[in-house]
Amino acid sequence: MKRTATPRKQPRQNRSKNMVETILAATARVLCERGYARTSTNHIAEAAEISVGSLYQYFPNKDALFIALHKRHEQQLQALIEGMLSQLLAQGKLLSLRQAMASLIRAWIQAHQLEPELHRRLEAEFPFFEPDEEVQSTERRIQAEIRELLSLHAAEIGQADLDLATYLIMKTIESHVHALVIAPPSGFSPEALEAGLLDAIMGCLKARPETA
Amino acid sequence: MKRTATPRKQPRQNRSKNMVETILAATARVLCERGYARTSTNHIAEAAEISVGSLYQYFPNKDALFIALHKRHEQQLQALIEGMLSQLLAQGKLLSLRQAMASLIRAWIQAHQLEPELHRRLEAEFPFFEPDEEVQSTERRIQAEIRELLSLHAAEIGQADLDLATYLIMKTIESHVHALVIAPPSGFSPEALEAGLLDAIMGCLKARPETA
DNA sequence: TTCAATAACGAGTAATTGCTCGTATTAAGC
DNA sequence: GCTTAATACGAGCAATTACTCGTTATTGAA
């Protein structure tokens, strides 16, 4: 497996912009159908009804395809979450802390309804690539926005360290939603799970130091 | 890549029992050093200082190696956690709910200190195999034991559905510990994280239905 | 129409990989 | 020692794979 790193040309004409889209769409399709391990660049080219040569004009190597796909998907999710966050921030203290958290959780869950099978494949069977800089930067922005949301209700929050609180609730939401998408637990209704998750988040915020 | 499924012979003599151990140990070593994608059966045989032929006498195909390794590792972790759980159950109501949860969290974290790099590789860059039946059964037993632990303190617990509560706290602990091992967040001390996690768990348990 | 830049093509290649199978070595029962 | 079963070996095969590069087609401006 070569791993050429030579950068490829940027699409100039219209047909080649379409090409990039076609290739990524085919990559997603084949990934969902065959899984990462059994997906080859030849398969992708065939599914996209183009030649391998064309594929390699825009992507320097196989992994670049998946990295691009991964990035695009993450950015779509992030956009949905940020949309809800800006709404919540705009409303200020009109909403209670609990209401705001409930909305955040719901948005997070809904975002993950976007191409869930692709999400599953990307998250579950993907080798560990270094996270994209742009995605990370948005992640930091989301974190800052959640922190701001929390600070609106600082009076109600027991946890003194707002940064820690932000980190904890993000990780908690993220992991539960992840579990919901990857392997939805049987026996519990989505509503019950959502409510339970909200309780956990609120508990984590309300908590005041107690003696062990 | 063939994927022969013919079952292989069970080791009878001593030398072959050692062989299986040697092979698994080498698999772990190579996996940690090279990562899953760049690990071949030839590499493993070389690292184990045996021949590929010998390897294929005990493992029907490449994935069987990783499946066996994965299973062994999971069982080790489960054993540690179950050990702590039986201790906690034996102590009955001597410990407060909070104390019991704190011990559980600590045991969970400590269990994951066992070969963390191997754990990282297995969890992060492993294709999606169907979970092992034996491992799943132990998982269910652990879940039942946690439920029992909770039911000892049912009076203090707001969440009416103990099964849901059990599921929620398991997933919460699991995911936070996972994050701690895979990508420890910078900026927070381990103690603060542990305390925050405990708060989240307790909040999730204490929560009583509120009006949204 | 001409022509050069851009894009698309796809047969072919070099490398790798999983795995087999015929052979050699060792162990155990007699 | 002799015999037989168990174990270990490793050269090599068949299949797959990522990727190249010489060629052809398309575009659009002059």
Image (spheres, coloured by chain):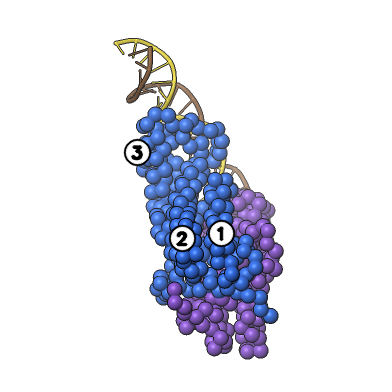
Chain colours: A blue, B purple, C yellow, D brown
Q: Which kind of residue does numbered mark 1 sit on?
A: Glu
Residue B176 at x, y percent in the picture? 59, 66
Q: Which kind of residue does numbered mark 3 sit on?
A: Glu
Numbered circle sitting on residue B20: none
Q: Which kind of residue does numbered mark 2 sit on?
A: Gln
The chain identifier of the residue carrying mark 1 reads A
In the figure, residue B116 lies in which quadrant? bottom right
- Residue B185 drawn above or below residue A207: above
Q: Residue at x 65, y 65 (%)?
A: A161
Viewer-nearest of labels 3 and 2? 2
Q: Which residue is more in the foreground, B122 or B68?
A: B122
Q: Residue at x 39, y 55 (%)?
A: A115
Image marks 2 and 1: residues in contact by CB distance under 8 Å: no
In the figure, residue B98 lies in which quadrant? bottom right
Q: Residues within 10 Å of mark 2 (few under 14, many from 20)?
A: few
Q: What residue would you read off at disc 1?
A: A148
Query: Left or right of B28: which side holds B169?
Result: left
Q: What residue would you read off at disc 3?
A: A49
The answer to whether residue B9 is visible is: no
What is the CA distance from the residue labelled 1 to the residue labelled 3? 48 Å
Query: Is label 2 on the same chain as label 1?
Result: yes
Q: Which residue is more in the foreground, A166 or B193?
A: A166
Query: Left or right of A80: which side holds B107?
Result: right
Q: Quadrant of the C terminus of chain A?
A: bottom right
At mark 1, the secondary structure is helix
Q: Which residue is more in the foreground, A201 or A114?
A: A201
Residue A211 at x, y percent in the picture? 69, 80
Viewer-nearest of labels 1 and 3? 1
- Residue B99 drawn above or below residue A117: below
Q: Quadrant of the N terminus of chain A?
A: top right
